[in-house]
């Protein structure tokens, strides 16, 4: 298991070794949806998942 930090609440999150870039995780502390942006060596970087609004063709 690798460790990462929630960018919102700084909670430590355990991440599977084989996690892939683009996977979505949830912070167990604050419930924030996070996207894996980097998985190199012992380092896993997470960012807040930005939900884009639908434009309904406007």
Image: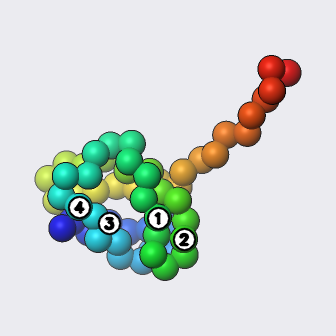
Residue 20's place in the image compared with 47, above or below, is above
* Viewer-side label of 3, 2: 2
State how far apart marks 3 and 2 are (Cα).
15 Å
Q: What element carries label 2?
A: loop
CB-based contact (under 8 Å), mark 2 and mark 1:
yes
> Residue 4: which numbered mark, if any?
3
Q: Residue at x 52, y 59 (%)?
A: 33
CB-based contact (under 8 Å), mark 4 and mark 2:
no
Furthest-right residue in this view: 58
First of labels 1, 4 by sequence position: 4
Residue under numbered circle 2: 31
First of labels 4, 3 by sequence position: 3
Residue 37 at what x, y percent from top left? 37, 46
Residue under numbered circle 1: 26
Residue 44's place in the image compared with 4, above or below, is above
Furthest-front residue in this view: 56
Residue under numbered circle 4: 16
User: Which residue is more in the foreground, 56 or 11?
Assistant: 56
Q: Is residue 21 left or right of residue 58?
A: left
CB-based contact (under 8 Å), mark 4 and mark 3:
no
């Amino acid at each position: 298991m690798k460790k990462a930090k929630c960018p919102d609440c700084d909670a430590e999150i355990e991440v599977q070794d084989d996690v892939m870039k683009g996977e979505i995780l949830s912070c167990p502390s604050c419930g924030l949806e996070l996207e894996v942006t980097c998985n190199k060596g012992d380092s896993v970087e997470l960012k807040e998942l930005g939900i884009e609004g639908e434009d309904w063709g406007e």
